[in-house]
Image (cartoon, grey):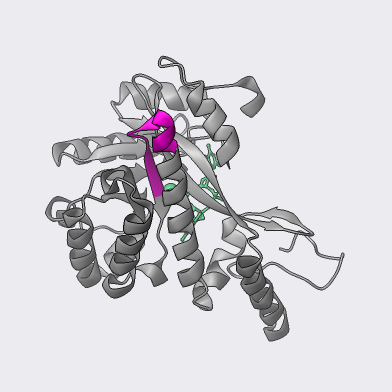
């Protein structure tokens, strides 16, 4: 429920919450203003190559810096952005902002650092997404092979016809594709070999229970071996402790991200970190655990 409950009438929308029309109107107005007033920010969570510990990519994660309530997590406002179609301008803002930042990192010598951006179901249309990407790539001159789009397994499966076209268009532009929250939807696994997919991201719900649930451990191993047999890389999300990290390294998972490695952080802090990069460490700092 709303973090501000009791303080005033403003409530954040969350799935399952039955907001009144007035509350939603207020929130929608605030979201519109948030875009106009530049209150959205992207934080970036590093993704490391597990064997070497080197940072190879970052995932852009949106935050709403609310003037009164501080940073609001995306689960609180993305559903309403989707319902109101505001996700289209906000999603375009996220892509453009992320690509500009990536270009800047490349200029600072951090090539070929990769940027992953999450794509919402409303953005998932050939006639919207592809021209938008062409425009942004043209504007920023970012190397498209360093750009990765994260599409959730459920979006991919529920829009299979669009998926075929969109994935081919992305592939033709050398933009990478990763399947987010993999294992939580109901994939027809045969699609994995027919589509140009670069990575599967194992959902953190599996990683969380790797050491307590034999079935989650087996599912994680099975996803990794399935991916590898199809020539697809695996990225684990939600690595929260040394055990998670150790298990995934042993299981030959290529890449990972999570609080144990680093939390998402604003671009300037990450830039400092990246420029001080030491080739041989995981970037783990006590202050961030
Ligand atoms: P996601 O794409 O699966 O992103 C991973 C989420 O897990 C992020 O939450 C991240 O901060 C969190 N996380 C990372 N490491 C750990 C960990 O070790 N433990 C735990 N418990 N959590 C971890 P966040 O930033 O709150 O984002 C939530 C979701 O919102 C994302 O899930 C993504 O689906 C969506 N999202 C975020 N930014 C955007 C965006 O720009 N556009 C769209 N369409 N969706 C976005
Ligand atoms: Mg993601
Ligand atoms: Mg994910
Ligand atoms: Mg997830």
Q: Nearer the viewer, residue 180 or 91?
A: 91
Residue 106: say if magenta: yes
Q: Quadrant of residue 254?
A: top left
Region of the chain picked out in magenta, as a range: 105-116
- When asked about the image quadrant of residue 17, the answer is bottom right
Is residue 167 left or right of 54 when viewed as pictured?
A: left
Report the residue that reaches farthest toward the right.
7
Tell me which residue sits at (28%, 66%) in the image: 130
Question: Closest to the observer: 100 or 264?
Answer: 100
**Residue displayed at 49% across by 62% down:** 93
Coordinates of residue 272 in the picture (x, y in percent): 56, 28
In the picture as drawn, the residue positioned furthest to the bottom comes out as 21
Q: Where is 178 relative to 33, above or below? A: above
- The picture places residue 244, in percent across and down from the top left corner, at 45, 27
Q: Position of residue 270 (x, y in %)?
A: 54, 34
Is residue 17 shown to the viewer in this render?
A: no
Left or right? Give the position of 89 relative to 194: right
Task: Confirm whether residue 197 shows in the render.
Answer: yes
Quadrant assignment for the C terminus: top right
């Amino acid at each position: 429920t709303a973090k501000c409950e009791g303080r005033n009438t403003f409530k954040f929308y969350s799935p399952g919450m039955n907001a009144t029309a007035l509350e939603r109107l207020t929130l929608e107005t605030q979201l519109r203003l948030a875009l106009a007033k530049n209150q959205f920010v992207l934080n970036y969570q590093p993704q490391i190559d597990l064997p070497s510990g080197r940072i190879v990519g970052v995932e852009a994660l949106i935050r709403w810096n609310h003037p009164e309530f501080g940073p609001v997590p995306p689960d609180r406002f993305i559903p309403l952005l989707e319902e109101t179609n505001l996700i289209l301008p906000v999603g375009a803002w996220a892509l453009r902002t992320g690509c500009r930042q990536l270009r800047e990192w490349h200029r600072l010598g951090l090539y070929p650092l990769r940027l992953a951006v999450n794509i919402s179901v409303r953005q998932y249309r050939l006639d919207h997404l592809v021209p938008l990407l062409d425009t942004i790539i043209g504007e920023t001159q970012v190397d498209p092979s360093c750009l990765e789009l994260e599409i959730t397994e459920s979006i991919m499966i529920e829009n299979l016809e669009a998926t075929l076209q969109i994935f081919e268009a992305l592939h033709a532009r050398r933009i990478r594709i990763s399947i987010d929250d993999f294992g939580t939807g109901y994939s027809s696994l045969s699609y994995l070999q027919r589509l140009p997919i670069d990575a599967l991201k194992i959902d953190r719900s599996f990683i969380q229970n790797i050491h307590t649930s034999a079935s989650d451990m087996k599912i994680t191993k099975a996803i990794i071996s399935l991916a590898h047999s199809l020539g697809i890389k695996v990225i684990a999300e939600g690595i929260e402790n040394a055990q998670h990290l150790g298990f995934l390294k042993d299981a030959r998972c290529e890449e990972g991200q999570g609080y144990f490695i680093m939390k998402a952080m604003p671009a300037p802090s990450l830039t400092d970190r990246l420029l001080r990069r030491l080739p041989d460490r995981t970037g783990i700092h006590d202050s961030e655990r």
